[in-house]
Image (cartoon, rainbow, N blue to C red):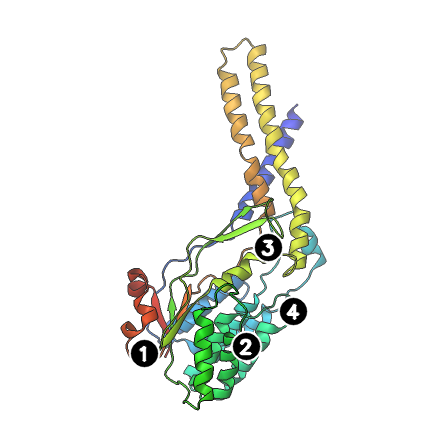
Amino acid sequence: MGFAANRARGLSLMIGCLSLMGCAHQQDFGLYRPHPANRSHCKGIEETIDLRDRIDTLNNLSHAFDDRCYETVIKYGTRARTEYRYKTFSMMKEAGSLFVPDGVLTDYTLESYERGYLTFLLSASYYQLHKSADAQVELRRLDNELFALIYNFGEDPVNILLSAALWEKLGEPAEARVDWHQLQSRKEPQKDPNDPIRSFGSKRVDAIDSGERVRSDWKLYAVGQFPDITWDLKFFSSSDGYFSVTALQPFLPDCSSDTGVRISTVSWFHKIAIRHSNDYHPLLNVQSWIRLPFGLVYSIVPLTAGAGIAVGGCAMDAYGHGNGSLCQFSIKGGVAMMNQSPKVLKGTVQPDLRHWEYLPSSFLLTTADELDREKCFANLPAELKKRETIQILE
């Protein structure tokens, strides 16, 4: 009896640890305000960068760019893109990951949109340092990063828009036209013929074709904070996999005007949401289905242990001719243990939702002399205009 009880306690402790591991995928970031650029501050950012911590490194690169620490972005961003670009397969890690929450044992690999945005930050950093040739090299690489048929892939309208504007700032209308045309002819969203991003791209293509000078006065703003992400199990009405991934805060709708355009990063969220689909990541999809039976088995342990506590306590109370207090206490304890079963299941099958966290929820691109005169800024909520709009490129 003692051996069985110790074994049950050991299994419960192990499952509790697995559950805690599974819940530790999200880190909340508050509003970040740019710091005036100076060498000592940039050095301070460099001292906090640990390339072994991939998500933290990406967040620090965003901070460095916002704070105009462009040399820091180039120094560490180039290394991060190289080291985080490919998934390194390890038979031991892949096999071990079947028994623990997804992502606990494996290093994070950049999504295609993250490779693209990191490349844009490198190009924009070179541009700000007046190294136009290097900026153009990085912009040409951006397309390769988006469409490379490696571990993850897919075109992204946000990075294409940023690339088009930077090509214009570099005085390259032909290159800019290629990107504007991609936005003009993009297939998504299929249900919206009046998509503002598509119509804005069409206007820029027409302007370049008519011989209008390129706009070197584009100004880029980051608007809002990329939302927190949550998930739940969804076994029914699910076309692929059993995860339901949702954003806790809504994205702003896209907007265009005569002087600018605002595009949300909802396409980046969609990449995270489909990470475990068979069409996008077959390996993660297969692993998630294999991990499910282990989660079900783990979740049975607190059920049986809880039932044993309840039944055993009441039996001891009856055998000892007690007043029922022990039985009542045992039932409460047993039910509390049994209630942990769903948490254990979720903790075991926890999907890998790691991502570059310090990103905006939208980008605003404008040529307006004053930001208040930009329609796509004027219609923002007051809180976003006052506190959460940061100029990142001028």
Q: Secondary structure at mark 2?
A: helix
Residue under circle 2?
142
Q: Residue at x 54, y 35 (%)?
A: 340
- Direction from residue 153 to residue 23 in the image, left or right: left
Can residue 299 be seen from the camera position used here?
Answer: yes
Instruction: Decide: is 315 above or below 341.
Output: above
Q: What residue does disc 4 label?
A: 150
Query: What's the residue type where badge 2 is placed?
Result: Leu
| Residue picked out by circle 1 | 368
Q: Amino acid at mark 1?
A: Ala
Task: Give the labeled residue for mark 3.
Answer: 103
Cα gap from disc 2 to disc 4, whole angstroms:
14 Å
What residue is drawn where x is 44% and y is 63%? Answer: 358
Percent from the top left, x then y, of residue 279?
A: 65, 60
**Residue 49: x %, y % from top left:** 48, 67
Q: Which comes before the other along the chain, label 3 or label 4?
A: 3
Q: Where's the N terminus, which quadrant?
A: top right
- Of the two numbered discs 3 and 1 on the same chain, state the one appearing first in sequence: 3
- Crowd class of label 3 (few under 14; some 14 to 19; many from 20; radius 10 Å): some
State how far apart marks 3 and 1 are (Cα): 44 Å
Judge whether 44 appears above or below 277 on screen: below
